[in-house]
Image (cartoon, rainbow, N blue to C red):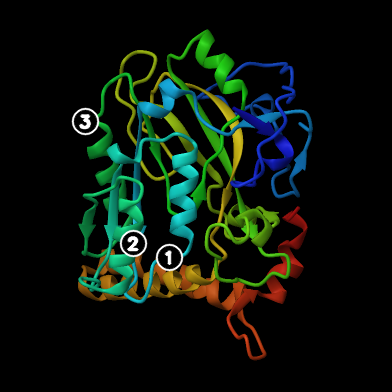
Amino acid sequence: KARPARAMFDSFAPAPSIHTKRVNHTHGPCPVTIRSRGCQWPLRVGSCAKPSWRHAQGCELRRLPDAVAESTHLFAMLAVVQSAIDPLLPHWLQHYASLGVNLTIARIVLHAPRCDGSRGLNQTLAALRLHGVTRPRIFIDTWSSSIKTDLANDYFRKVPANAYIMRVDSDEFFSFPCELLGELARDPRGLAVLGMMFDRVAEDWSMPAVTPIGTRPLSAQYPRRCRFTFCAWKENEDKWMLLPATDARGERVAFKSSASLKRGLALRYLRWAFSHYRFTEAAVALTLRKSEEYSHEGQRESKLRGLASNGRVQHYRWLFKEVFAGRSGAGGGFEISDRMRAKFGHVCA
């Protein structure tokens, strides 16, 4: 159930040899309240440095342990557009199904304003049905991160106390270290996995369309691993990938935001990395849509809310000014800008 570390970012890597090795670690899981250097294994990164991998003999799980997978309750809000399905979605569904996550009990929310009867919504629903998701919730109001957090917490507080929870975005492909097996066997109480995201980027810095499943692995389409999220726009690059529904004291685990939990939880955690596919052709369209929605929200809401919304609008406009650049030639499309590459290219591996 493990694969070599060299394939840790390849969701569709060939099955490894059964003779995979595991690293002997010099420390155990980290208390949730402590972020010491020892808790950064297997990643060795500075405040804004290129990732350095020092676990050549390490491995990650191809599939979660059955007891964990069967009791994992996944929450996700997926953006839908009228024209067509996000081509990343079939890869995303296959990835989590391959991990063993029971998608039939997942809470999938579709953000689909003005998409009723559209090709994009119908294709999305069909892809979900292939994985047993037959009744996703359709959400048509203005999206916000606080609304998504409320929806996630409402779902998670209703799952069994001995279950596991997973909050994931549609461009995030979580993965888990082999040492999770030993820690679960030793003491599963309060054990979590904290991930560090790496933005996946195409070799030529373009933002190509994702190809269908079976044509080319995602890791080959987007081979670069970059720390743009943290280094370029100072956003949190850590994400809780797997959490117990209750902590070691029996208290319910709840989110404050997509990346943070309520205070005072008795948890310990393992560290690992995961792939974040935000630089695809479809991501450009989604960025445009978010900018438009936040702009409208700012016009409708109170002055205070409007200022907050305008701040988000400025963020997305900055993306187009500083990060995305129009490509010349017949192909058109977008690519990572020369300015972005010159300033932050050193944080890519």
State the separation of the CA atoms marked 1 and 3: 30 Å
* Residue type beneath disc 1: Asp
Task: Tell me, yes or no, if residue 99 can be seen here.
Answer: yes
Locate the N terminus by quadrant. Answer: top right
Q: Secondary structure at mark 3?
A: loop
* Residue type beneath disc 3: Lys
Which mark lies nearer to you, 1 or 3? 1
Residue 90: horizontal and vertical position, in percent?
A: 45, 56
Query: Residue 2: which disc?
Result: none
Residue 75: horizontal and vertical position, in percent?
A: 34, 43
Which residue is painted at 67% across and 75% down in the image? Answer: 337
Q: Work out whether 178 lies above or below 141.
A: above
Which residue is disc 2 drawn over?
124
Using a 10 Å C-alpha cutoff, classify the residue at mark 2 as few (fewer than 14 neighbours), some (14 to 19) or many (20 or more).
Answer: many
Task: First in sequence, mark 1 or 3: give its number.
Answer: 1
Which residue is painted at 53% across and 48% down in the image? Answer: 236
Task: First in sequence, mark 2 or 1: give its number.
Answer: 1
Residue 206: horizontal and vertical position, in percent?
A: 65, 72
State the residue in front, 80 or 228: 80
Task: First in sequence, mark 2 or 3: give its number.
Answer: 2
Using a 10 Å C-alpha cutoff, classify the residue at mark 1 as few (fewer than 14 neighbours), some (14 to 19) or many (20 or more).
Answer: many
Which residue is painted at 28% across and 66% down in the image? Answer: 122
Which residue is disc 3 drawn over?
158
Q: Secondary structure at mark 2?
A: helix
* Residue type beneath disc 2: Thr
